Structure formats: structure tokens, C-alpha cells
Image: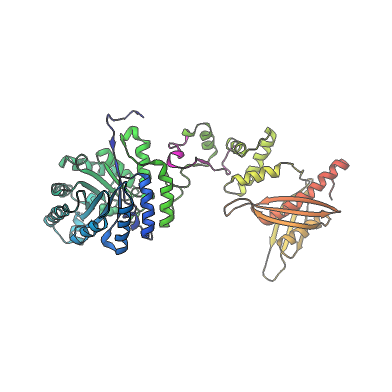
Amino acid sequence: MKGRFMKEKERKIYIFDTTLRDGEQSPGASLTPDEKLKIAKQLERLNVDVIEAGFPASSPGEMRAIAMIAEAVRGPEICALSRMLAYDIDACRRALEKARRKRLHVFLATSQIHRQYKLKKDKGEILKMVSENIRAARKDFSKIEFSPEDASRTEPQFLAQVVQAAVAAGATSINIPDTVGYAVPQEFGDLIRFLIKKCPALGREVILSVHCHNDLGLAVANSLAAVLAGANQVECTVNGIGERAGNASLEEIAMAIDTRRDFVGCYTDIRLKEITKASRMVSHLTGMVVQPNKAIVGRNAFSHASGIHQDGVLKKRQTYEIIDPKRIGLSGNQLLLGKLSGRHAFNARVRKLGFRLTASEMAAAFQRFKQLADKKKYIFDEDIETLLQEGAGQVPEVWKLEHLSTTTETRKAPHAHLVLSFNGKKKDASSTGDGPIDACYKALEKIIDQSAKVTHFGIQSVTGGKDAQGEVVVKLSVQNREVTGRGTSTDIIEASVKAYLHAINKICAHLVSQEQGPTPV
Ligand code: KIV
Ligand code: ZN
């Protein structure tokens, strides 16, 4: 796609996934070696360039998990994290022994606050450690990534010195972390430009990477600003999990670069169709729920609720959608039917469900849909089916439920009060019973002045969710005739009363045809 801002030559942006290292640092997200391997295989299907599999020196289990991944995952480069310690670097060597392609990732904090309080080292000592350790690691690794931890809060001149020393010592990638998520996009982009100026190999012979945390919610924006400034690798995690507020989210980075390729002038090799599967797997295995409104992978990311938006999307999807959900492995978008939905969305769903209604049937069904939507947050397909089936073979509502209340108290018989209308005229009665439904039925029989034998009573949930609709089916035996009634409601007592009245109204309808006028039973 050639857009307005398309650059002459597009740059590839390497995706370095750290779900299994920084992501696993999310509180409560620890994974077993088998779970890590499962995720690594999905990351391979996602076609990330590098998988940071973990921190081998942290535990024997972690070392085993990384070794399993190094042996089984052959596509992406496998990377392991290390402090600037010979012991850690050797642990990485052992963990990555069987990897087809491997990378060592060493880090050392460089900011003044970390130097003074955490490391108790001066600038000279930091520079010496960086040079010596990277040089030493070269005997075991041909690819070495170096991260000056807390880079965004490091004095820029000193940061440039450290980066130059790391490159001179043999680092093949330089990663600039915004460790505490402190940077803002313009500032972070400027820092990247400054470093490229001081060390022109960055973004060319030496990979220039960024690693942004989300403490101010700017991790993706900062990463993109860095890409626009010349960085050619982004470190990120599936669903944006990671230490504290997390890392830049892989799916947001990949989709932003893809969707705005016209402006960014870059691409990634991510297989976009695997995004949804990866997101669900990581959420399931880490137990970290994805927020519903999360970009790209949140449950609501492709759901349209307002009638105006639904109408627009039905006319042309792109009116309110910048990404085709099928591109990320979803089956399509969702028009959530609820009280904000209009006729267009309702009619389209009715047709999709296979119902063919006349204009007046559709109008009546839409009215019932709106009544239901006032009671129920979302109307699912099953609700619509129920609603249409109730509407088919319409029975005139001679007896209508106007109001119902029940009270149940420990050690007291349940009590019901019912108001019905008969051709618009209200009548009411109260009763107690063996249960609230029995109390309702007794009150109902008082009003209609007729008793019926309930020969069958069935109840089932016909929709999903906590506010599911219950359907009640009753069979009544009245004056030697059997008649079935159905009622649905989010309240099963109301559904039970509606079912009884439906049966009674059927009998009334039958009498109408014989006697030319509605008659109570
Ligand atoms: O956030 C950070 O600084 C890190 C480094 C180890 C790259 O995770
Ligand atoms: Zn980090």
C-alpha cells in the first residue's frame, strides 16, 4: 500500500518478545517449564524474531525451561538474560547450548540514582564493567545485546559513552530501556536520534532496540516514537504483561506498524492471524485477564454497541473499524445488541439467524426486542430466537401480567401479590403457597376465577450470562383440555406466570373463534 507518507524504502522492525522473561515478572504470572514451552511455540507461530526465554541464573527450573525452549523452538533466535556477572553469563551459555540461533542479553544500570544507591559505583567503574564483560562473553556468544538499565533517566552524554563502549567491546544490539516508564514520546524519540548521532552504527550494523514500560500508559507510544526516530527493534510482550504496569504490547506495536504503514514506513514479520490465539493462550496460562477495552485483543475491541455505529458498520465496515478483525484471527466483528441498537442492526441479525418476517412482524419483533433490552444489558442470538418464537403464532394477550411481587421469609409461607388486566381492566389478588411460584399460581387462579391442574412444569435457561433468560413451559389441564404455555423472562417467577397466562390466553383465543368475543376461562 503506497500512502501519502510512504518512504522510499521500508525498514524492517525486529520484534523481540519478552513475554517469557519480563512478562513473567508480572506479579502472579509465574509459569511452569511446560507452560513456557507452549507459549514459546505459539510465539514461533507468531513469527517473532527473538524470544527472550528467561533469566537462567534465577533458578534451576528457569534454566530447564529455557533449555527446553532452546532445543524445541527452531525459528526465532532464543535469548537469555544476564547481569554483568560471569556466573550469570555462564548460566546463559549452558541454557542456550542447544539453540539453533542464540543471543546473550546483558544489562547494567547507568542512571545516577541506580549508580549511587543500587550499585554504589561511579561512571568509570560502570564503563569498565560494560567493556570487560561484553569482551569476555564474546568467547561464547556471537550475538550480544546490551541494555543500559534506566537509560531514559541516565545523563544523555554518559549514556552515549556507555553505548559507544558496549559497541566497541562487541555488542551486536543496543537496547535502550525506559525501565520505569518515565519517558514521553517526543523526548524518547529525541534520545534515540541523539544516540544515533553519537554512534552512527546504531540501527544499521548494530541493532538499535527499545524496551518501554507502561507506568504512564505510554509504552507503545514511546516505542513508536523510537521507531520513527530510527530504532529497528522493539521489545514487547503479548497482552503487554510485565513488571508493574507492564511492557509495550506486542499486538499493539505490530498492528500500529501494519495499520499505519503509510506513515511509519516500516513493517514487521509478525503473522498477524496468530495474534488472537497468542493473546488467549498467554492470558489463560498466566491467569492475567485481558481488560475488555484493551486495544486489538480486548473483548470489546471489535464490538459496536451504539445504534449509529452499528448502522455505519453494516453499511461499510470501515466507517468505524480501522482493522479487519479477520486479520488478527477473529471470525469477525460483533454488533452487540442492546438498548442502544437500532432497527438496522436488529433486522440484520434477524435475517442472519434465518428468520424471514414481514414488515409488520419485524416492527412488532423490534418492539419486543426493545422491551427486553430495557431489562437485559445484552441481547444474544438465543434471546432473539426466543423472542421471535414467542412472537410466532401470536396469541392475543387477553389476560396480561401488569405487576407481580413475592416475599419469602424464613419459616413463613411465601406470599405473592399479582395484578392482571383483562382486556385492559385491572384485577388483583394475593396468596401464599408452597413456594413463590405456587403462591403466584394460586393468586392468579383467584383472579381468573378458575383453577387448572399443572400437569407439567419445566424450566431452562435459554441464554448465557448472569442475566440469562429463563424459559418456563407449563402444561395445564383445564376442563378436560390440555394446553401448553411458554414464558420467558430474566426472572424465573415472572416467566412462570407468563407461561401460565400464555396457556390461558390460548384457551381464550379458542373461545373467541367460537363465541365471537374474548371470554375468560
Ligand atoms: O526494564 C528493563 O530495564 C529491563 C532490562 C533488563 C532490559 O527489563
Ligand atoms: Zn523491563
Q: Is residue 126 left or right of residue 353?
A: left
Is 384 or 282 nearer to us in this picture?
282
Q: Report the residue that reaches farthest toward the bottom.
A: 411
Residue 201 picture quarter: top left
Q: Looking at the picture, does residue 120 appear above or below residue 510? A: below
Q: Quadrant of the N terminus?
A: top left
Badge count = 0
Q: Residue at x 84, y 55 (%)?
A: 450
Residue 109 drawn in magenta: no
Q: Is residue 179 visible?
A: no
Measured from the top left, where is residue 215 in percent x and y? 33, 52
Residue 337 drawn in magenta: yes
Q: Residue at x 67, y 70 (%)?
A: 410
Q: Is residue 305 left or right of residue 496?
A: left
Q: Residue at x 34, y 57 (%)?
A: 24
Measured from the top left, where is residue 176 in percent x and y? 24, 48
Is 217 or 49 nearer to us in this picture?
49
Magenta highlight range: 319-342
Measured from the top left, where is residue 521 in percent x and y? 84, 50
Q: Residue at x 19, y 49 (%)?
A: 142
What is the image's colouring? rainbow
Residue 271 picture quarter: top left
Is 229 or 415 nearer to us in this picture?
229
Measured from the top left, where is residue 448 in percent x and y? 81, 54
Q: Is residue 334 visible?
A: yes
Q: Is residue 253 left or right of residue 82?
A: right
Dominant secondary structure, magenta? loop
Is 162 or 184 nearer to us in this picture?
162
